[in-house]
Amino acid sequence: MSSKEIQYISIIKMEQNIKLDHQVFTNNKLLTAEQSVFLLDNGKISNDALFKIKVLENEIENTIVSAICEDADQIIIDRHSAKNKNDIALTFDLSHNIILGKESVKTTKSFYNNGNIDFLISPFTILNEELIQN
């Protein structure tokens, strides 16, 4: 496949399932879009789902894998506010940060069996983008 291709894989946890959305773009145009659904395996992403992600990653060199961080304790604070040393601050916008606990990030990575997640996305970010676009 062409080096101008980029693939996005989104891992979405839904009750007892994992949904994989993957899209391939060539020259910023959608080439393909597909979805796969897998059952959770003892509360974690299954080996079948991990295998599917690896197969997709091997097909296109420029692949980005993302998942939603479902930590209910994440908050938005003023960018200049102090944070706890056990927290991670992620830029939300020019004046705010999203605060996540380091343990929460560790737990989330463990849930995905360290499935080479490139980006953990906060639901706050998704809502903010939706508000900006609409």
Image: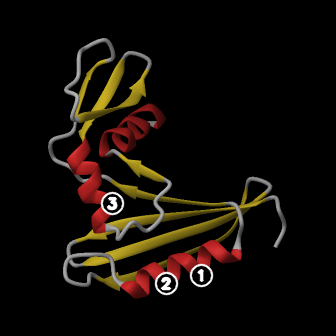
User: What is the residue that sits farthest to the front in this orientation?
Assistant: 85
In the picture as drawn, the residue positioned furthest to the right comes out as: 2
Q: Residue furthest top?
A: 80
Q: In screen coordinates, is 116 left or right of 103?
A: right
Labels 1 and 2 touching (C-beta < 8 A):
yes
Is label 3 in a helix, a strand or a loop? Answer: helix
Q: Quick check: 95 above or below 72? A: above
The CA distance from mark 2 to mark 3 is: 17 Å
Q: Earlier in the sequence, mark 3 or mark 1?
A: 1
Q: Is residue 34 above or below residue 63?
A: below
Whole-percent x, y for residue 70 in the image: 24, 53
Circle 1 — which element? Answer: helix
The kind of residue tagged 2 is Phe
| 3 vs 1, front mark | 3
- Residue picked out by circle 1: 55
Q: Quadrant of the C terminus?
A: top left
The answer to which image quadrant residue 6 occupies is: bottom right
Secondary element under disc 2, as helix, strand or loop, is: helix
The answer to whether 52 is drawn above or below residue 129 in the figure is below
User: Which residue was labeled with disc 3?
Assistant: 109
State yes or no: discs 3 and 1 in contact (Cβ < 8 Å).
no
Residue 8 spot, x, y in % from top left? 58, 61
Query: What label does residue 127 carry, if any?
Result: none
Q: Which residue is mark 2?
A: 51
Q: Is residue 125 left or right of residue 53?
A: left
Residue at image coords 41%, 40%? 130
> Residue 115: x and y, percent?
43, 68
**Residue type, mark 1 in image:** Val
The percent coordinates of residue 24 (x first, y second) are 67, 66
Q: Quadrant of the N terminus?
A: bottom right
